Amino acid sequence: MALKKSQKSLKRWSKQRWRTASGKKSSETGEVYAPAATIKKLKSTAKGKKKLAAANKKKREATKKGKQHAKHGQHKGKKR
């Protein structure tokens, strides 16, 4: 039986290596999780570093407020 679209998406999502920019736990650093390829791409340019820093700032602010999820915009418009 063929996989449904949502099942294919979940399978593709789970194959990606998700991590933080520092490689440490997000609970220790307050950083966002993203696929390793995305982290590498963002860290390679000055503009990307600014985006990553802004996302981490929003994540830390949301965590201080007791929220589990932060709307930091790193995944906006991505098909994951």
Image: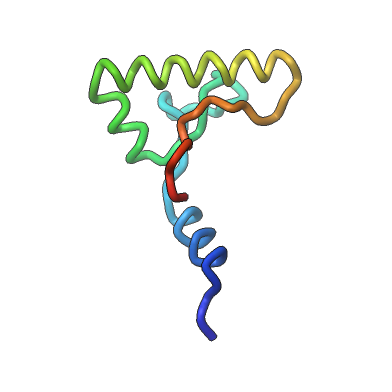
Q: Residue at x 66, y 19 (%)?
A: 62
Which residue is most to the left? Answer: 45
Which residue is most to the bottom? Answer: 1
Percent of width and height locating residue 52: 41, 21
Write down the quadrant of residue 67 in the picture. Answer: top right
Between residue 75 and residue 42, name the one nearer to us: 75
Q: Is residue 70 left or right of residue 11?
A: right
Write down the quadrant of residue 30 in the picture. Answer: top right
Between residue 36 and residue 55, name the one nearer to us: 55
Above-or-below relation of 21 to 54:
below
Q: Residue at x 50, y 55 (%)?
A: 14
Percent of width and height locating residue 76: 47, 36
Percent of width and height locating residue 7: 55, 66
Q: Residue at x 50, y 60 (%)?
A: 9
Which residue is most to the right? Answer: 66
Quadrant (top left, top right, bottom left, bottom right) of the N terminus: bottom right
- Colouring mode (rainbow / by chain / secondary structure / one colour): rainbow
Above-or-below relation of 41 to 80:
above
Q: Residue at x 47, y 50 (%)?
A: 80
Above-or-below relation of 2 to 72:
below
Percent of width and height locating residue 21: 41, 26
Q: Count the labels in the image.
A: 0
